[in-house]
Image: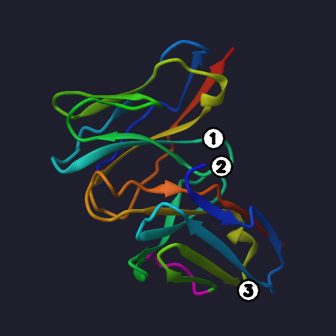
């Protein structure tokens, strides 16, 4: 248990559905991240929020929409996804302030399947 | 971030020490060495990190060579639950990005 939780753990959705992934951290961190891990590929950083402001958006399609209402919660809103978006979506958090405190801790992930 | 090179796979015996090498010959002076592992279909788990000195925690030890061009992660007494993909990553402190490569698939055998 890392202190980062993600719900749901598994999600199956059609291409016309709208769904949201939720991440919550209980570590007192102030930065949160979304990563995507497709089969046989390395993790890809999607979004970074620091102090609830989005600081990085790595050319992610607009069908993925992040939201960070406070430093403990992070959402990823999904709409009109494609089958190639099927992947493991991972949330992470860290405490900004120095190289010995900004280690990223990951949640268990949401396994998304788009039909 | 500096590129790292790790063996694709390695086996080790349960109860024995597992030594995982990593080469990072282009590492910069302000880049840290991080180790994570990922058990099948789970989120990556942080193990340990260091800059210059050797580090030890409850999970593992990290040995960094004096020239910092390579390091070794040591799992002192491997168990079956240590079977995972282990990632060696170098990053500048404060940089958001963690560049996960292919890692080393470690299989612990009874």
- Label 1, label 3: how far apart the Cα atoms are: 31 Å
- Label 3, label 2: how far apart the Cα atoms are: 26 Å
Q: Is residue A55 magenta?
A: no
Disc 3 secondary structure class: loop
Magenta stretch, main secondary structure, is loop
Query: Is residue A100 depicted above or below B53 in this figure?
Result: below
Task: Check residue A33 in the rendering and tell me which mark sits there, or answer none.
Answer: none
Q: Chain of mark 2?
A: B
Task: Check residue B39 in the rendering and tell me which mark sits there, or answer none.
Answer: 1
- Label 2, label 1: how far apart the Cα atoms are: 6 Å
Question: Are circles 3 and 2 on residues that touch, CB within 8 Å?
Answer: no
Q: Is residue A61 magenta?
A: yes
Relative image position of residue B18 (x, y in whole percent): 49, 20
Question: Are circles 2 and 1 on residues that touch, CB within 8 Å?
Answer: yes
Q: Chain of mark 1?
A: B
Residue receiving disc 3? A80
Disc 2 secondary structure class: loop
In the image, the segment drawn in magenta is: A57-62
């Amino acid at each position: 248990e890392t202190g980062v939780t993600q719900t749901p753990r598994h999600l199956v959705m059609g291409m016309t559905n709208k769904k949201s992934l939720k991440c919550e951290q209980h570590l007192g961190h102030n930065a949160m991240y979304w990563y995507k891990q497709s089969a046989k590929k390395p993790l890809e950083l999607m979004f970074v929020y620091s102090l609830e402001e989005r600081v990085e958006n790595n050319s992610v399609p607009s069908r993925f929409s992040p939201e960070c209402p406070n430093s403990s919660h992070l959402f990823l809103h999904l709409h009109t996804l494609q089958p190639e978006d099927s992947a493991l979506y991972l949330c992470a958090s860290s405490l900004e302030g120095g190289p010995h405190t900004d280690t990223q801790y990951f949640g268990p992930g949401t396994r998304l399947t788009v039909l | 971030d500096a590129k790292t090179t790790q063996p694709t796979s390695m086996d080790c015996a349960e109860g024995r020490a597992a030594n995982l090498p990593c080469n990072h010959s282009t590492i910069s002076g302000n880049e840290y060495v991080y180790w994570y592992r990922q058990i099948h279909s789970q989120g990556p788990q942080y193990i340990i990190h260091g800059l210059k000195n050797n580090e030890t925690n409850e999970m593992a030890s990290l040995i960094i060579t004096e020239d910092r061009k390579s390091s070794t992660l040591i799992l002192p007494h491997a168990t079956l639950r240590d079977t995972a993909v282990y990632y060696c990553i170098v990053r500048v402190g404060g940089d958001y990005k963690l560049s996960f490569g292919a890692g080393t698939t470690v299989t612990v055998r009874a």
